[in-house]
Amino acid sequence: MTETRSTDLPSDGNSIVLSVDGVSVRVSPGCTVAAAVLMAGTPTRTSVSGEPRAPLCGMGICFECRVSIDGVPYQRSCQTLCLPGMKVTTTGAQLLP
Amino acid sequence: MTQIFDTLVIGAGPAGMAAAIAAAESGQRVGVVDDNPAPGGQVWRHGTPLPNAGRRWKGQFEAAPAVRLAGWRVIDCLRLAPDGGVLRAECNTPSVPAADLHFRHLILATGARERFLPFPGWTLPNVMGVGGLDAMVRGGLPIAGKRVVVAGTGPLLLAVAAHLIKRGAQVVAICEQASLAQMAPLGLALLRQPGKLRQGAAYRWATRKTPFLTHCWPLAALAEPGADDHRDPGTQPRLRTVTLHRNERQWNVACDYLACGFHLVPNTELATLLGCQMQDGFVVTDQQMRTSTPGVWCAGEPTGIGGVDASLLEGRIAGLSAAGKSEAALSLSQRRPAIQAFTQALEHACRLNPRLRDLAAEETTVCRCEDVHMGALRERSSARDARLHTRCGMGPCQGRICGAATEFLFGWLPDPARPPIFPALVSSLMEEAAAGSPAQPEIDSR
């Protein structure tokens, strides 16, 4: 965890830090895990034929944003709010060089 | 967990909130299930700013005595009879066991989703829905300084472009597939809806520096940077350029995000599971918003894409009717025709140009869950035939995304939903329905 990225949401001093594939992301309360993953710059998943995918619908319908959260796979990150210390793992990270 | 309600409402958007408030006011024991962390639906989702009406309704909803199951979704119907039934719901938090929700009256307020059409590159990261990108920004994604192309069809384009600009985005172009002539009846309908007209004018004023291009659509989203784009070379495939088409001319625009959605399609999976009569993809109701299935009401977008005012009105009618206040419900329903005229004008304005069928190339992905290409679907005869031979529509979204596309591309009608209507844990499906009389829930009356 060397890198930190932050949202531009108003910060009231209560910012949350979570990890996305080992990258530390600082967000404000109310931030969705999907937004945090986009900020970390990694795709959320690898498709069945190996393409990188990222959120599409933003409302829990398309399942493109699914990630593992604290070891539990298959979570819709767009409908999950960030909590301090969350460990998010994508299947999109393997596509990064 | 087992809970029992007089009236159970599915969805906490405008229609669901209005229904729950009306039923609770009438002394009903009310439960509300919604899969999002907070009420308000998509139009009033959490994240600033909310219009006054949204704040007022959410405040009233939160003050109403009702059991709110936020972060839950219905996966199956265990029992349905004219005097009530049982739905099974699963929590987004996997450690929480599934719940059986008993009801006497059921109100479906399941809202709508965006219609997506496949074109080359639409699966690239940073190509999202119009509401999709808006949801990400409201969910904390920084957008200031980012170049965004907003494309597709419908009033959402202008509303979202205005919001993104307010948050500091550089909206490069708004591309509406409809022609100006096609949108004219909607303009006339707006003249009879001063509130909506004012809102539309405010959105256009906020986006005045951005070209609003009618009869214009994206041909392709590309991962290669354009010749004029020297920003962040990047390391992973993601959107860098959009090819736009208008009046036989095509050109490339460099951008960071493409927000593209072709109006809305209703969420009717639960209604079809319960056997509600459908017409042209929408749930049929009577004046009191009763469906053809006894004990089941439906309100909001699943009855016709009419927007927030129609949803609030229909929700209230359904809530009153479910509580046995038929007279009050019928009296309110006299306001529906004016709103339905707007719904029809909107549908006409958003009718898709047949040329959008030619956007997908042979190797363009149509089903994103199973990576089924356009070329594999051309020789299939129906949605079912495509499922059996290509797995199109068999992934976790259960055809919610590709179904609307293949309906437009090939005229394939979706089959009625089968349980579970959302992917569910095996443990949620295995749990036997609780026997005996279930415990009365604590009513949260903050």
Image: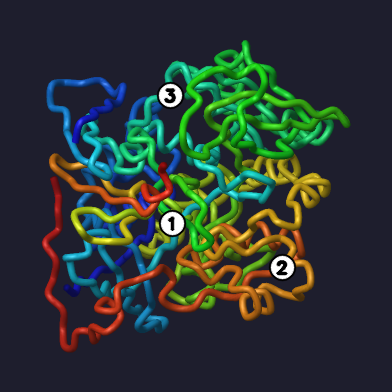
Q: Which amino acid lies under the numbered mark 3 shown in the image of this protein? A: Ile
Q: Is residue A9 left or right of residue B208?
A: left
Q: Residue at the spot x=41%, y=53% of the render?
A: A45
Circle 3 chain? B
Residue at 19% across, 36% down? A1
Of badges 1 and 2, nearer the viewer stands: 2
Distance Cα–Cα, label 3 vs label 1: 23 Å
Residue B155 as seen in the image, left or right of residue B324: right
State whether discs 1 and 2 lie on one chain: no
Q: Position of residue B251 (x, y in %)?
A: 76, 26
Which residue lies under the disc numbered 2?
B376
At label 1, the amino acid type is Phe
Instruction: Please name the residue shown 52% across and 40% down the image.
Output: B237
Q: Which mark is residue B143?
A: 3
Q: Is residue B363 left or right of residue B126?
A: right
- In-front residue for pair B84/B246: B246
